[in-house]
Image (spheres, rainbow, N blue to C red):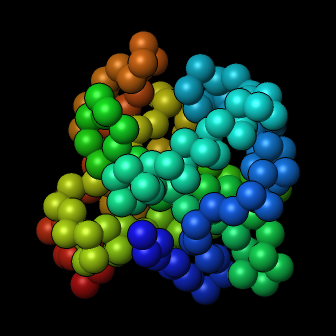
Amino acid sequence: MNFPILETERLRLRMWKEEDFEAYADICADPQVMQYLGKGQTLSRPEAWRHMAFLAGHWHLRGFGHWALEEKENRRLVGRLGFLQPEGWPGFEIGWTLARSVWGKGYATEGAKCALQYAFDEMGKEHVISLIHPDNAASVKVAQRLGESFEQEVEITGIPVMVYGLWKAQWVKQQG
């Protein structure tokens, strides 16, 4: 399978590699990073490994997934960003998780804009959603910066989340 690599001014979105594990395990062990993901709990090292394997495996099974997100300047892994649609999901989701050390730098918005362009232009997607915990104000702001708007509330694996969404026609119009 050919895995696309996307680049922005400051970021590279690329396939996962084993060397990413230490940095990814550190991200998954941070309570502030994990507070709005899943059940809001940190992941142990074995759980972080399984999750990283899930992210890589999603690419093989669906042909898309979350990229490893690295800073171009120093090639440091700073998070994950991309698309998911596992069985039972309410739609084609774009999501992001960043290390706390890079919060506030605009990386989520920058990377997600690049990924959305890819989804609409290269993948032929018409609608993209983000699933956001109701208390995650920072992710709501990112979704809004991307042009997403609130669509509904749903439950995913017993956890209530807000669905923000964006249609291709809206994206094209806002890109001008």
Q: Nearer the viewer, residue 137 or 41?
A: 41
Residue 162 picture location, percent across and down: 37, 32
At a point 29% along the width and 29% down the height, the residue shown is 88
Indicate the quadrant containing the N terminus: top left, top right, bottom left or bottom right. Answer: bottom left
Q: Is residue 118 above or below residue 49?
A: below
* Count of numbered circles in the view: 0
At a point 84% along the width and 51% down the height, the residue shown is 22
Q: Quadrant of residue 113?
A: bottom left
Q: Is residue 36 left or right of residue 127?
A: right
Q: Nearer the viewer, residue 137 or 131?
A: 131
Q: Is residue 56 left or right of residue 28?
A: left
| Residue 58 seen in this snapshot | yes
Q: Is residue 29 above or below residue 74?
A: above
Q: Is residue 4 left or right of residue 125?
A: right
| Residue 149 seen in this snapshot | no
Residue at the limit of the structure toward the top, as seen here:
158
Q: Is residue 75 above or below residue 49?
A: below
Q: Is residue 36 above or below residue 61?
A: above
At a point 19% along the width and 69% down the height, the residue shown is 124
Indicate the quadrant containing the C terminus: top left, top right, bottom left or bottom right. Answer: bottom left
Q: Nearer the viewer, residue 123 or 150?
A: 123
Q: Quadrant of residue 72?
A: bottom right
Residue 102 picture location, percent across and down: 76, 60
Residue 132 picture location, percent across and down: 45, 37
Q: Is residue 46 left or right of residue 145?
A: right
Residue 141 picture location, percent across and down: 50, 51
